[in-house]
Image (tube, rainbow, N blue to C red):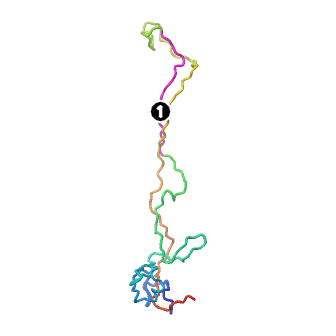
Amino acid sequence: MEVFIGTIQPFAFNFAPRDWALCAGQTLSVNQYQALFALITTTYGGDGVQSFKLPDLQGRLPIGQGNGANLSQRVIGAFAGAESVTPTLANLPIHTHGTTTFTATTTVQLASVISNPVTAPTAANSFIGASGSGPGSATIYSDQQGTNPVSLKGVSTTLAGTTDPAGQGQAMATMNPFLVINFSIALNGIFPSRS
């Protein structure tokens, strides 16, 4: 079967036929394979003076060059992709978690204005408490609100809590279902013309 030099073909067997080589990124001599070098040059590697490389399709899928509708531009010889990725926070959809614990701490600083000042007759023996010589306890509480209610100042609340943990941070596979076959490239054959 006569093929164009540089043809890449899948084979069901595990070796490259005569005049073919596995697409495994091997380095070839420019002098020995001048016709193939004239077609692929250093697209897949090499110094271009003494050596050039074959495409490496080991564990990779070939895709067409150019760009389809709504697809990225792909240049011949470029390679990319990974077998798995670990998602980052930017990759996750917006979501919420339930709380595991919730605590609140409130601090109150009391600063008040006396609403109903009382003037004691003398500074001595002016204590709030039961009379030592009287018939009973002194009434120091009132059921009436003062004319100037006390306002609490400096109230601040600090909330703290934890959320239920989610996920394990493991890498996830990005590979499509696949079947492994042998890709080989023709080293000899018909030199293709452009017209």
For mark 1, give the secondary structure.
strand
Which quadrant: the C terminus? bottom right
Q: Give the residue number, with chain letter if any, for mark 1.
A: 107
Residue 95: x, y in percent?
A: 54, 53
Residue 80, above or below 153 = below
Residue farthest to the right, as pictured: 69
Magenta stretch bounds: 100-120
Residue 164, above or below 113 = below
Residue 133: x, y in percent?
A: 43, 6
Residue 19: x, y in percent?
A: 44, 90
Q: Nearer the viewer, residue 30 or 166?
A: 30
Q: Residue at x 51, y 48 (%)?
A: 98
Q: Residue at x 55, y 54 (%)?
A: 94
Q: Quadrant of residue 58?
A: bottom left
Residue 110 lies within the magenta run:
yes
Residue type at mark 1 is: Thr
Residue 128: x, y in percent?
A: 45, 14
Residue 119, above or below 29 = above
Crowd around label 1: few <14 · some 14–19 · many ≥20 (10 Å): few
